[in-house]
Image (cartoon, helix red, strand yellow):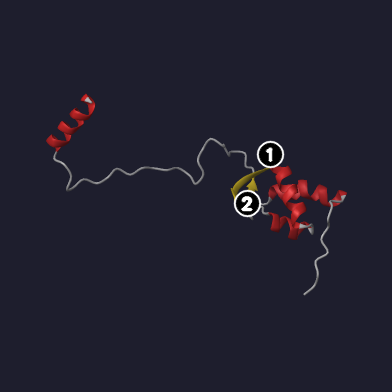
Amino acid sequence: RDKLNNLVLFDKNTYDKLYKEVPTYKLITPSIVSERLKVRGSLARRALSELAGKGLIRQVSAHRSQIIYTRVTKDTDDDQPEGGVVVEKPKKGGGGKSKSKKKAADDDAEAE
């Protein structure tokens, strides 16, 4: 197996490539950055934390050994939960309390 000859420090060309190309990737991990830019994994982790601090990329998931980032899109709001819209479906009736008993239970709950 060939030994990888990855960079330990950024040179000017690689640093420019980091800021130009990496924020356009859909899935960004330290291993992907290390492989594509030919830099060490520790340098890729530091670079990604720097990009995230400047707001060029957004963290999706953090695990002890792997951090996953994604590109920042124009319509992304941090206030909204991830995964889309959550719609609660009403429960289907059947086997429950009858309407008169249910109404009486609601009245008792409001009284308390």
Residue 40 found in image quarter? bottom right
Q: CA distance from mark 1 to mark 2?
A: 15 Å
1 vs 2, front mark:
2
Does dot 2 land on a helix, a strand or a loop? Answer: strand
Please say if the residues under marks 1 and 2 sit with CB atoms less than 8 Å apart: no
Residue 66 found in image quarter? bottom right
Q: Name the residue type under label 1.
A: Gly
Which residue of the protein is positioned furthest toward the top in this rendering?
111
| Residue 27, x across and y down, in percent | 64, 53
Which residue of the protein is positioned furthest toward the right in this rendering?
12
Q: Residues within 10 Å of mark 1 (few under 14, many from 20)?
A: few
Residue drawn 74% across and 52% down? 44
Which residue of the protein is positioned furthest toward the bottom in this rendering?
1
Q: Which residue is mark 1?
A: 55
In this view of the protein, which residue sits in the foreground, 91 or 68? Answer: 68
Residue 68 is labelled as 2
Does dot 1 land on a helix, a strand or a loop? Answer: loop
Residue drawn 18% across and 29% down? 108
The N terminus appears in which quarter of the rendering?
Answer: bottom right
Question: Seen in the image, is 102 located left or right of residue 43?
Answer: left
The C terminus appears in which quarter of the rendering?
Answer: top left
Q: Name the residue type under label 2.
A: Ile
| Residue 52, x across and y down, in percent | 69, 42
Residue 7 found in image quarter? bottom right
Relative to residue 69, is residue 38 depicted above or below? below
Of the two numbered discs 1 and 2 on the same chain, state the one appearing first in sequence.
1
Q: Residues within 10 Å of mark 2 (few under 14, many from 20)?
A: some
| Residue 22, x across and y down, in percent | 72, 50
Question: Seen in the image, is 108 located left or right of residue 31?
Answer: left
